[in-house]
Image (cartoon, helix red, strand yellow):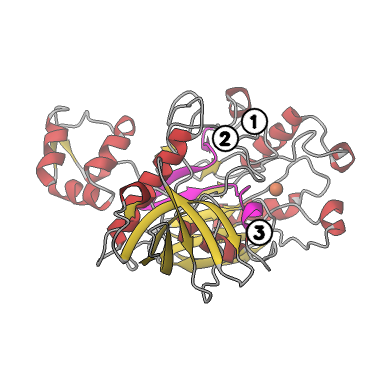
Amino acid sequence: MNEDIEKFFLERGCLIEGKAIEEIERRGGLDYIRKNENRINFSSRVFAVSDLPSVNEFSIVKEFHLDGFPGISDNFIDLFKSRYNILHSRLNERSKNHFFTPVSKLRRDSGQVFASGMVSDYSESKKGYGILEIEDETSSIKVILPKTYKETIIKDEVIGVAGQFSKDGTAIFAENIYRPEASKEPGLSGTSVKVMVVSDIHVGSKNFLEDSFLSMVDYVNTQGISFVIMNGDLVDGIGVYPDQESDLAINDINLQYRKLADLTSRFNSNVRVIIIPGNHDIVYPTEPQNPLPREINSMFPSNVMSLSNPVWVEIGGRIFLLYHGTSIFDFLEAIPGTTMNDTDKIMIEMLKRGHLAPEYGKNLSFIPLKSDYYVIDPVPDVLITGHVHSHSVTTHKGILAINASTFQEQTNYQKMMNFNPKPAIGTVVDTRDLSSFLVKF
Ligand SMILES: [Fe+2]
């Protein structure tokens, strides 16, 4: 590994200090260097730690763009194939004692069986048994769940089934269900960088809490915060829902962004601000969403970075996955008894399934990509959503999951729906140990 890094620098005409190699390895080794090559200056003859991008730098781990990664297909087959392949591999990486076999490769003559597949159908028998159909690209099989199984099955999620074949080999009587969970080794430490996490700013709405937002800016500028993440719905937009005009203080979307740009220019110039779009922003609603268009982006100061939704970034040696969270409503519909105040539970359900939005064809419309961009891969240290204007912080299997708060107070629609948002709460994350605390503005 050391030699590979040395070789990489030698090929670019410089030697590298041992301490710089150690630091690079801590940040992810050769992979880190490759991804950040254009941020690195190779002009010194001996490359030192101080030549590396500062911790106030961040790197993009995985970003979407309609014209590039991961490419568009003319149907959804490639997307589902890639979802199955990645999550099937993850199931088997995590499983110590047995191998989950794709449905099409099962030998249907043995008693004990470990199978993996994507859920294509789910129903309940009159006697209360859950009955599934799981499939891979070419084959499918029925799975009968034990009566005691109480967890929700979501259509199109990938699962592992341990059980017994029925006598005729046409069904599996499941004893256990396994999931390709996203998990991280606990206790690994990163560099200490403080990140302020907020969402759903809704500039332009009559209900935008400008004073609270400015208090947040002041806090960031004075309390050693290096990064601010704004997780979508940056502005209220125009024509997002019927009669929106009556809820708007600024009814021109360009002026809404100008106002946001003015507000973000109040952050100290050494604070880096990462913004992603949501369903109210000036990008198409199909997901994944491109970063804001160039003409909008150019309004912002240079310390503001406009990225895609979702996007994976690395800050202080930690991977943050930023997803606005439109699929939360799919999970709410799928999981009985959950409400908009259960975003912590919903985010755990995402992590358990290794997927941000498993169910196809509900509240979300997708671009038919060649690979499934919504698989939680790479596994992040921090998963951030917004969208529902609630707030929660939880940890699951070493991953910090934050549903970030909004800067829009209760709207008439929310009042009608009897939903009380939890606005103006900043969540501050320290990347060293993934500890977090809340600040009310
Ligand atoms: Fe929102």
Q: Residue shown at 51%/45% (left/top)?
A: 271
- Residue that mark 1 sits on: 284
Image coords of residue 410 (percent x, y): 81, 56
Image coords of residue 56 (percent x, y): 41, 46
* Residue 190 seen in the current view: no
- What amino acid is at disc 3? Leu
**Location of residue 135 with respect to 91 vertically, above or below:** above
Does ligand 1 reach within 8 Å of label 2's beta carbon? no
Q: Residue shown at 90%/40% (left/top)?
A: 246
Answer with the quarter of the image where residue 367 lies.
top right
Answer with the quarter of the image where residue 99 lies.
bottom left
- Residue that mark 3 sits on: 332
Stretch in magenta: 302-331
**Location of residue 379 with respect to 237 vertically, above or below:** below
Magenta residue check for 333:
no
Q: Residue furthest left?
A: 3
Label 2 close to label 1 by CB (< 8 Å) = yes
